[in-house]
Image (cartoon, grey):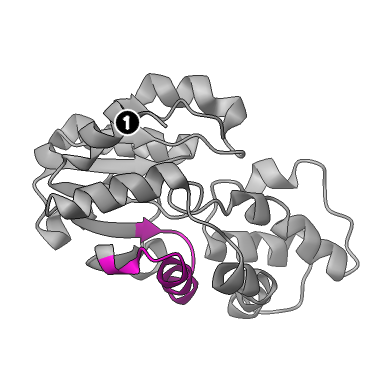
Amino acid sequence: MNEILVREAAAFPFMVWDLDGTILDSMRYWLSLGTDYLIRRGITPPEDLRETIDSMTLEESAAYFQKEFGIELSVPEIISGFLTMIADEYRETIPAKEFAAEIIKQAAEHGSRMCVLTTSDHDLAEAALRRVGLLRYFEAILTAEALGMDKRSGAIYETVMEKLGYVPAQTLICEDTLYAVRAAAEAGAHTGAKVLAFRDIANADDWAQITALADYAEEGAC
């Protein structure tokens, strides 16, 4: 673990944290979810399914499945199916990433204010964070769905910082996916916020692009 980077990151007074692939080692479960869902319904998934839905919200993925595969369920019903399949993993299995947990704990000791901004379900996020012992460090769990925004634009990070009263120039945004790091860097260019990128099993192919965009990057093994 890069102790110097941990201390530097933890020194930020304000932090906006992504959940999946950043705090939680959960992306390995999400990577197969769409494929598994279709197979359970007797549908052969296309080879490029993962790439197609990678940057979609749950609502967008459900709408895509509904339209592309002729699933005769409502978007909320499809989402419910997704969450039912993965819920037990959040409540019982998915671990926290050691690097993230250490930063969060040190930041809390410094009195930093922190929130979670996720595209995942609020209740599952809360359950997982409580189980791994990190929930108490966050003043809010915000979801893209509740905000009516997504992580393809830096506007969502600017909105969160404004909503919670974070000083952008003293804020660190922690993300893992290329599209979210790009959007966070866009917000940083406008506001002065900094971006810390986390390595993950799901972003290996994009890591060179990610590190070029981020101000800091976790270089440990994913």
Quadrant of the drawing holding the C terminus? top right
Residue 217 placed where, x, y %?
A: 38, 28
- Percent position of residue 59, x then y: 54, 65
Assign the magenta stretch its main secondary structure.
helix
The amino acid type of the residue labelled 1 equals: Glu
Residue in the picture at 45% in, 46% down? 98
Q: Is residue 121 magenta?
A: yes
What residue appears at the point 22 percent right and 56 percent down from the top-left corner?
A: 114
Classify 80 as above or below 9: below
Q: Nearer the viewer, residue 15 or 160?
A: 15
The local crowd at label 1, few if under 14, some if 14 to 19, many if 20 or more residues have their Cα within 10 Å, is: few
42 to 216, vertically: above or below: below
**Quarter where residue 197 is shown:** top left
Q: Is residue 84 left or right of residue 182?
A: right
Residue 140, horizontal then vertical, whole percent: 26, 67
- Image quarter in which the N terminus is found: top left
The range drawn in magenta is: 117-136
Q: Within the magenta stretch, is there residue 60?
A: no
Q: Residue beneath label 1, please?
A: 3
